Image: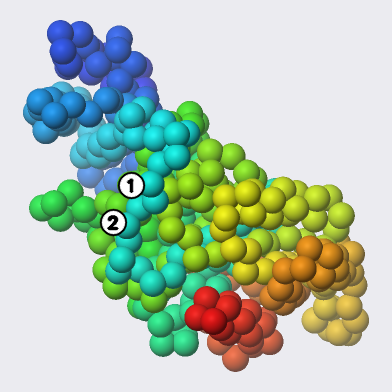
Amino acid sequence: MPKLTQEIILSALRAVLWEGKDIVTQKIVAGVTFTQEKQGTKVNLILEIEPKKDANIEGLKEQIEQTVSAIKDVSSVAIIFTAHQAAHAHEHGAQKMDLPRIKHIVAVASGKGGVGKSTTAVNLAVAFSQKGLKVGLLDADVYGPSIPRMMGLTDEPYMDENKKLAPIERDGIKVMSMGFLIDEAQPMIWRGPLVHTAITQLFRDVLWGDLDILVVDLPPGTGDAQLTLTQTVPLSGAVIVSTPQDIALLDARKALAMFQKTDVPVLGIVENMSYFECPNCHVRSNIFSHGGARAEADNLEIPFLGEIPLDIKLRELSDKGEPLTLSEPESMISEQYTAIVSKLWDALNA
């Protein structure tokens, strides 16, 4: 039995016409991925199309759903529409979104990958929730979404009659990620315009409701996703995560400079993997050096929020989808996250 492939889907979609030409030839189909379900294979389509007042987008969507659903072994179809028009707006000074029901939006960023940014974002969100606050957690890393796994979530968000997605909730935290909509094994290879529109939709088209704070996990670096967020979302501030060594701090400075240039307040730096303490002999080892982020914060005159050690349990629980701050709220590391959150909340409400 032949396995479903992008070629099979694209071949079928050549029968779907838009303004007299098929949508494949017009390069409207910008992405095809697959998610395995019990009853078959879910097909996820990303369509890049310019919106027009008189265009029958719903009719096009129905055609596509009918065409793809008719293919053998396809159990369901999910369609995400994007548009160049919206994507280019930020290049010309786009207005920021109006999100009045969210009091504070805080981005968690890093200049490079592998420094524990997502782990930090998850545990900060949990610590905010443990203060009795209404918390949302948005995974804006559209290239490599990891929040669903770290939060132990596998459900798919439902869409209401107004085409709005309902976030998945865990322990009172509302969570949304592109990872809910695609197979985690599928690579996300998107151009800048697609990134812009996807991130915008994660804010505008999600039923966040009333939130005291929305924690946003950014992808590493200073590319399209980060610029989209800083230019179109009313950020209350940003937290930069870095490890202590010089090369990581160089990249952290780039992230800091990006936020400063876009007038986003930097709330402080967290030094992750700050040190390793042997669980048997309790001797500390500064594997990645130590204190570099604190010194950098002093040099740049921004707050140093705290240090989180390199800890095997923190890593193991993240892999299992059990954030340490939920599983062991009385642990030393959980207390450090709580202390960081207290500093952030004070700064946000100063």
Identify residue for label 1: 201
Say whether residue 243 is left or right of residue 98.
right
* Alpha carbon distance from label 1 to label 2: 7 Å
Say whether residue 82 is left or right of residue 285.
left
Say whether residue 185 is left or right of residue 6.
right
Instruction: Depth check: give the residue in front, 17 or 298.
Output: 298
Report crowding for label 2: few under 14, some 14 to 19, many 20 or more residues within 10 A (C-alpha).
Answer: some
Instruction: Depth check: give the residue in front, 302 or 107.
Output: 302
Instruction: Depth check: give the residue in front, 88 or 188.
Output: 88
The residue lying at 60 percent from left, 91 percent from top is 330
Q: Is any part of residue 147 visible from this angle?
A: no
Instruction: Depth check: give the residue in front, 71 or 259.
Output: 259
Q: Is any part of residue 198 visible from this angle?
A: yes
Q: Position of residue 205 (x, y in %)?
A: 27, 51
Task: Say what amino acid the circle numbered 1 marks.
Answer: Gln
User: Image quarter for residue 137?
Assistant: bottom left
Q: Position of residue 88 (x, y in %)?
A: 41, 31
Determine which of the numbered discs, if any, sits on residue 156 in the image: none
Task: Say what amino acid the circle numbered 2 marks.
Answer: Val
Identify residue for label 2: 206
Q: Are marks 1 and 2 in contact (CB under 8 Å)?
A: yes
Report crowding for label 1: few under 14, some 14 to 19, many 20 or more residues within 10 A (C-alpha).
Answer: some
Say which element carries label 1: helix
Q: Quadrant of the N terminus?
A: top left
The residue lying at 49 percent from left, 73 percent from top is 125
Say which element carries label 2: loop
Give the vertical position of 330 relative to 113 (above or below): below
The residue lying at 54 percent from left, 53 percent from top is 218
